[in-house]
Structures are given as C-alpha cells and as structure tokens.
Amino acid sequence: MNSQDLSILSLIAEASLVVKFVMAMLAGVSFMSWYWIFRKGLTLRAVRAETGNFEQMFWSGIDLVQLYRNVSQDRDNAGPLARIFESGFREFSKLHGQKGLEPADIINGARRAMRATYQREIDDLEAHLAFLASVGSVSPYVGLFGTVWGIMNSFRGLANVGSATLAHVAPGIAEALVATAIGLFAAIPAVVAYNRYIHEVDRLSIRFESFMEEFSNILQRQLR
C-alpha cells in the first residue's frame, strides 16, 4: 500500500485476513447492538406510556371489575402493569369465591399471582440487555486483538527491509489500529444504552412493586 494512501477504506482493504475477519465480526456485532438499542428504546418508551395510561385509569375511580374486563379483552396490548393487575384480580376473585379461606390467604394468593406476572414482565424488559453489556465489555478486547495481530505482521514485514523508516511502519500500524477503532465504535454505544436502559427498567420495576403493594391494600379493605 502507498504510504500516503491512508484512507479508512484503503486501510481496511489492505489489512491482513485475520484483521479483516476481526473487523467484519465487530461490524456485525455493532449492527446487532444498534438494532437492539433502537428496538429496546422503542419498547421501553411504549411501556412507560402504557404504565402511565393504566395508572391514570386505575386511580380515576373506575370499577375494578370493569377495569379487569377491559384489560382481559386486550391483554396482549394492555401493558405490563395492566397484566400484573389482571393476574392479581383474577386470583383474588377466584379465591374470594371459595369458602373456608382466611382474608390473609386470599391476599397472599393475589400477591403471589402478581409477583409471578411481575417477574415475567421484568424478564421481558431485560431481554437482550445482557447482549449489550457483552458487546460493551468484549468488543474493545476483540478490536485490540486485531490491532496486536496487525502490528505483529507489520514488524515481521520489516525484517526484509534494510532500512526501516516511519513510512514503512505507518501504513501497517494504521490499518491495525482501525480494528481498535471499530471495537470502540461497537462498545461505546452499547455501554451507554445498557446503563440507560437498565436504569429505566429499575424505575419501572419500582413503579410495578409500589402498585402491587397499593393494590393489595385495596383488596384487603374489600375483604373487611
């Protein structure tokens, strides 16, 4: 490669086979991480809106039986908090109709049903966040491997050069450093997105848990 031709495309084209493989792998991982970054961002935004809408409806004074029917008719699109409510109220209604049960048993049954649904919903919200965390932690090291390999090849090539100058070394080192740059390009957005999304999931989980406690208190008052 011409020592003056140090454009990014030419550096990638002239890189060794191993470095090209590393670059291609990092590019693929970066594409997948951006896909999940956008998809997870849209999902969390929708969940926030659904949660706010359900909380507004729940605290508006609507009859709980009517609210339960509304949620049951469109359960898949109701949102996580609505499904938590639906599972708790369904269990409450079933146990309330049975004789010989103490009020505490009925409330505990409703809480267990809500807790099970809550765990499934949180697991769904956290899905693929581990992938972003892995991309953020591993990509720089994969890029560094490509860089080390490229620099090794550059210095091995100098063995056949009588007088080594910066012009001989620069192209090989530059094409090797592209691998590190691509690794950082894949890692930085993944880390930022993971930290932001895990914080949003934590905030949603707190809202869900607070609702479960408040709803349990409402159900307990209905048994008095």
Image (cartoon, helix red, strand yellow):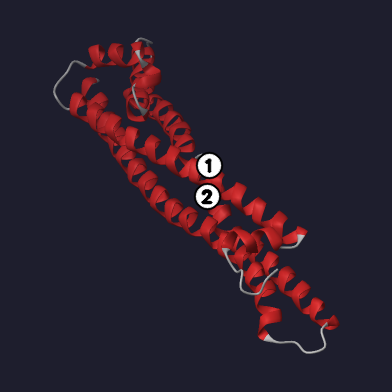
Q: How many marks?
A: 2
Provide the residue designation for mark 1: 128
Outermost left residue: 61
**Residue type, label 2:** Leu
Q: Evaluate if marks 2 and 1 touch, with contact meaning CB atoms under 8 Å apart.
A: yes
Residue 27: percent from left, percent from top: 60, 51
How dense is the environment of label 2, judged by Cα within 10 Å: few (below 14), some, or many (20 and up)? many
Q: Quadrant of the N terminus?
A: bottom right
Can you see residue 130? no
* Residue at x 61%, y 47% (from the top left corner): 28
Residue 111: percent from left, percent from top: 38, 29
Instruction: Report helix, strand or loop for mark 1.
Output: loop
Provide the residue designation for mark 2: 132
Which is nearer the eye, 11 or 118?
A: 11
Would residue 208 appear left or right of 59 to someone viewing this image?
right
Would residue 94 appear left or right of 184 to someone viewing this image?
left
Above or below, comparing residue 117 to residue 138 in the picture: above
Which is nearer the eye, 182 or 8?
A: 8
Residue 137: percent from left, percent from top: 57, 60
Above or below, comparing residue 133 to residue 209 in the picture: below
* Residue at x 50%, y 46% (from the top left corner): 129
Would residue 25 appear left or right of 101 to someone viewing this image?
right
* Residue at x 67%, y 69% (from the top left corner): 147
Which is nearer the eye, 143 or 59?
A: 143
**Residue type, label 1:** His
Q: Quadrant of the C terminus?
A: top left
Instruction: Report helix, strand or loop for mark 2.
Output: helix
Can you see residue 49? yes
Question: Gap between marks 2 and 1, in whole Å?
Answer: 7 Å
How dense is the environment of label 1, judged by Cα within 10 Å: few (below 14), some, or many (20 and up)? some
Instruction: Examine the image and state in which quarter residue 204 appears.
Output: top left
Would residue 45 appear left or right of 143 to someone viewing this image?
left
